[in-house]
Image (tube, rainbow, N blue to C red):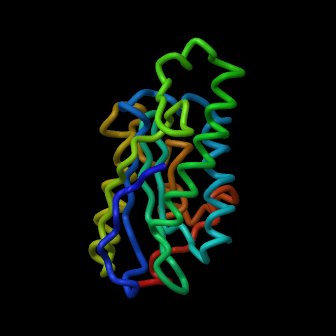
Amino acid sequence: MGTKRVAFSDDERCFFITTSCYQHKYLLFDKQCFDILFDNFRFYNRRYQAKLLGYVLMSNHIHFIVFFQERNFLSKYLRDFKKYSSLQLRAYISRTHPEILPELVYEHRSQHYKIWDDEFDDVVIFSRDVCETKLTYMHQNPVRAGIVKEATDYLYSSAKFYEYWHFDIQSELLHYLEVF
């Protein structure tokens, strides 16, 4: 699965990431889909010595802030995260919503279905101010979309962690103040 080439130096270790579902389709439609993403975050955070500082998982895209503790593995992290979460999400969709599969057909080399767009957006987080700005933007996403009135009401976000210091075991978050 392709991702864009990252031109950052190995010294950069904290990034705000946005990646979207294929053609902005609403493919993340229930708790099981989000659990698949959480499982992949946990696995690749361990594999690449990374921690999430924040996240919001929407129905057609996700935002998260990832901090690499040792060195920058962003390209590998996203390549693997998107590849394996795609396989798991496709399997789940084929069991629960097989009518969606024809919309996801994508024949290219050995790939037959597409869950994520190839590209992702990344912004280097280099200061506490930038991190706080991105966290606020991210957490307000479900509010702007009209899903909830308060960011802390959205279940698939780190907003509650930051507002109430409520630790969500699924996310294994690292507070941004421990980094900046």
Q: Is residue 96 left or right of residue 118?
A: right
- Percent position (x, y) of residue 138? 37, 53
Q: How many marks?
A: 0
Location of residue 144 with respect to 152 vertically, above or below: above
Location of residue 19 with respect to 178 vertically, above or below: above
Question: Who is closer to the viewer here, 53 or 16?
Answer: 16
- Percent position (x, y) of residue 15? 38, 69
Residue 146 figure quarter:
top left
Question: Who is closer to the viewer here, 11 or 65?
Answer: 11
Q: Quadrant of the C terminus?
A: bottom left
- Percent position (x, y) of residue 122? 33, 62
Q: Is residue 125 left or right of residue 111?
A: left
Q: Is residue 18 left or right of residue 44?
A: left
Q: Residue furthest top?
A: 99
Q: Residue at x 55, y 28 (%)?
A: 29
Q: Residue at x 39, y 59 (%)?
A: 17
Q: Residue at x 53, y 30 (%)?
A: 113
Q: Is residue 95 left or right of residue 57?
A: right
Q: Residue at x 53, y 50 (%)?
A: 82
Question: Who is closer to the viewer here, 168 or 100?
Answer: 100
- Percent position (x, y) of residue 20? 40, 42
Location of residue 16 with respect to 73 vertically, above or below: above
Location of residue 100 with respect to 72 vertically, above or below: above
Residue 170 figure quarter:
bottom right
